[in-house]
Image (cartoon, rainbow, N blue to C red):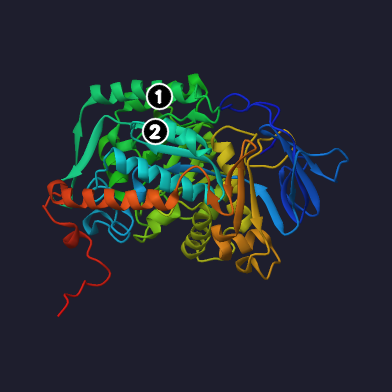
Amino acid sequence: MRCSPACGGISDGRMMTETPLTRIRNADWVVAWDSGAGRHVYRRGVDVEFAGDSITHIGAPRGDSAAREIDGRGLLVMPGLIDIHAHPSTEPMLKGLTDEVGSPKLYMSSLYEYLFLFQSDAAGKRAANEVALSELMASGVTTLCDLSIEHEGWLDTLGESGIRAYAAPMFRSARWFTRNGHAVDYEWNEAAGRAAMESALRLIERARQHPSGRLSGLVCPAQIDTCTPELIADAAAAARERRLPFQIHAAQSVVEFQEIMRRHGKTPIEWLHSLGALGPGAVIGHGIFLDHHSWLHWPSRDDLGRLAATGTSVAHCPTVFARRGITLQDFGAYKRAGVNLGLGTDTFPHNLLEEMRNAAYAARISAGSAHTLRTTDLFDAATIGGAKALGREDIGCLAPGAKADLVLVDVTHPAMRPLYDPIRSLVYAAGERAVRQVFVDGREVVRDGKALAFDYADAAARLEAAQRRAIEKVPQLDWARRSVAELMPRTYEVEAIQ
Ligand SMILES: [Zn+2]
């Protein structure tokens, strides 16, 4: 992919008001974009300058004075990471609860029996958003796709955070549920799905008008098995008309693969293709159970080729699946087939650096080879792969004219040392501990490793209170009326004091 900020791509808003020149002087390491070669390269001992929302210079020092100077010695300057799939309003509350659950009679998926047991109230959603956004920015994420059910104050929180965000209000024609833990049922309300889509498109329009200029939208029919074919086709058309990205959860469980096969005689990817929903603007959330996946033992081998031929991207979120023994097979095979991959944080912690690490390990274990992918592939997925999925050429790379979305990493942090390769030290060892400062649109959003917009500790305390409220209601929502203690017992029993 080219990173040529001046042309093309989908724009997410207006320019920031002009801010004075900032210069990172003599940066030890920079992950810069080599536009001739079309790839990231390391550059050493160079200056990085930005003004307003854009990068103005990467290279040898220039004589003019800068309003703000940052000493670049001991720093890695890299492009902000792009998270193309997250649920910040709901997932943070599930910490400690759903980490180890999966339905044994539904191929270990946690979707049908556990996902909707924990209902968050407005205060809980607010706290969850603040926690997730703080964690995301502190792990170097500067662009986020937020797949959530519409809720009050959503755009305000995204705007306050300082992150660049695509609001993706999920809509669907049915809800799934189970009466017995071994069969999935669907309760349909097509009119409600249609109304939710109209409402989602209105919300996306409000996001694009948001005064921060950093918000946009993504058209998101929630899941392939909960939407009518008409709703999916119309949503894909609405996204194309508005030049917005499109994303749908698909190929995320064995039972979903079987359900789509039962209904339509097609694999999930084949069916989406027949609806006209694949293409360069389309992202498949998860895309694990393609016809080649070993758990399916399916005879065809066409789905990867369908994704590649149509230019469809996959949002790969390894952690949430690895927790229940499920993985995409495998990152390297998708890449070799020509499929564009981006990364996401489907679950807690909202830490894209951990997702990168887990993506590497999951791929190498499932491929049975250390060579199925390189760290280069991971970092590309977390930057230009995500940008491509969103149809953008001005983020995910550091080049003059690109957005000033930058992450400054302390390469002198003990967890980064010995320092031979800063990206490998960051991904496999230091993680977010070495992330010192983050800028979005040239605005500082993380200082000394802490997101500035919210009080993370206070939000976490409010989230804990919300979790306690939700836990009490679980028996009313579980098909077998079980309590949390029965469904997800603690690591050790709490022993009674003698
Ligand atoms: Zn998801």
321, above or below 132, in the image: below
Q: Residue at x 36, y 50 (%)?
A: 92
User: Residue under circle 2?
Assistant: 154
Mark 2 Cβ and ligand 1 under 8 Å apart: no
- Contact between labelled residues 2 and 1, with CB atoms less than 8 Å apart: yes
Quadrant where the image shows the C terminus: bottom left
User: Residue under circle 1?
Assistant: 203
287, above or below 309, in the image: below
Q: So how many labels did they put on this image?
A: 2
Q: Looking at the picture, which amino acid does disc 2 mark?
A: Trp
Tell which residue pokes out farthest to the right in this image: 63
Left or right: 160, with 494 as reference point: right
Left or right: 358, with 105 as reference point: right
Q: Residue at x 67, y 42 (%)?
A: 397
Mark 1 Cβ and ligand 1 under 8 Å apart: no
Tell which residue pokes out farthest to the left in this image: 481
Q: Looking at the picture, which amino acid does disc 1 mark?
A: Leu
